[in-house]
Image (spheres, helix red, strand yellow):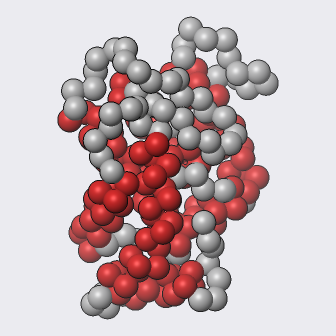
């Protein structure tokens, strides 16, 4: 993913500022500039869903964009902030989709999710997605944004730091704390992560 710089990324910041100032059409001009980034986010999220998932990446991109555009549009400051907001919107849409499918059944063909440092794609059962969503809501808001941006959005620490307007060190610290806490909530019977207190 790109960060703000001269060219299209800088155009995103300018257009977001214009949209916040009420300029007609500014928000609509943002979508073509971030579409590929949104599509990558959506593809990661869809690949992470259990097999047989019926939502497609293109639908997720469009639904997330509609969700962000509702109510006058996102209040994003720049491209990384907008992508972090899109990650949250996509997470919410997937949770809603899981709820709609009657996802409280156990079993099925899925793999356990792990909260590790990489941005590898993991399959998540609908039940586990709902459990993770409930646990995320209990986190400190900034830690929740770090998890959404990193785990769901695949964003790098530098992008997250820019989006949240904090240091990379703060992002790393929040990630470690949130990951340990979420692990203890999702897997209460498992031994704690080495080196981290739940």
Residue at (64%, 22%) from the top-left corner?
198
Residue at (52%, 23%) from the top-left corner?
112
Height in image: 62 above or below 77? Answer: above
The quarter of the displayed image where residue 119 is located: top right
Between 51 and 136, the residue placed more toward the observer is 51
**Left or right placement of residue 168 versus residue 114 in this view:** right
Between 61 and 10, the residue placed more toward the observer is 61
Q: Where the N terminus falls, by quadrant? A: bottom right
Tell me residue 110's x, y (percent): 44, 24
**Left or right placement of residue 14 versus residue 181 in this view:** left
| Residue 141 visible in the snapshot | no
Tell me residue 91's x, y (percent): 40, 46
The quarter of the displayed image where residue 76 is located: bottom left
| Residue 7 visible in the snapshot | yes
Height in image: 32 above or below 113? Answer: below
Residue at (37%, 70%) from the top-left corner?
74
Residue at (44%, 61%) from the top-left corner?
39
């Amino acid at each position: 993913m790109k960060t703000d710089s001269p060219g299209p990324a800088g155009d995103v910041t300018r257009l977001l500022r214009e949209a916040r100032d009420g300029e007609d059409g500014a928000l609509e001009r943002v979508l073509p500039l971030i579409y590929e980034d949104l599509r990558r986010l959506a593809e990661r999220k869809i690949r992470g869903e259990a097999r047989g998932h019926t939502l497609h990446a293109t639908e997720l991109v469009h639904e997330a964009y509609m969700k962000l555009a509702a109510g006058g549009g996102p209040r994003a400051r720049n491209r990384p902030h907008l992508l972090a907001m899109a990650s949250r919107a996509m997470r919410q849409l997937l949770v809603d989709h899981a709820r709609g499918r009657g996802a409280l059944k156990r079993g099925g063909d899925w793999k356990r999710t792990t909260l590790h440092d990489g941005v590898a794609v993991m399959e998540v059962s609908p039940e586990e997605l709902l459990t993770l969503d409930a646990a995320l809501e209990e986190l400190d808001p900034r830690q929740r944004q770090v998890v959404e941006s990193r785990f769901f959005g695949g964003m790098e620490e530098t992008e997250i730091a820019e989006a949240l307007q904090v240091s990379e060190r703060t992002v790393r610290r929040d990630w470690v704390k949130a990951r340990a806490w979420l692990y203890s909530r999702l897997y209460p019977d498992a031994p704690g992560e080495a080196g981290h207190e739940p």
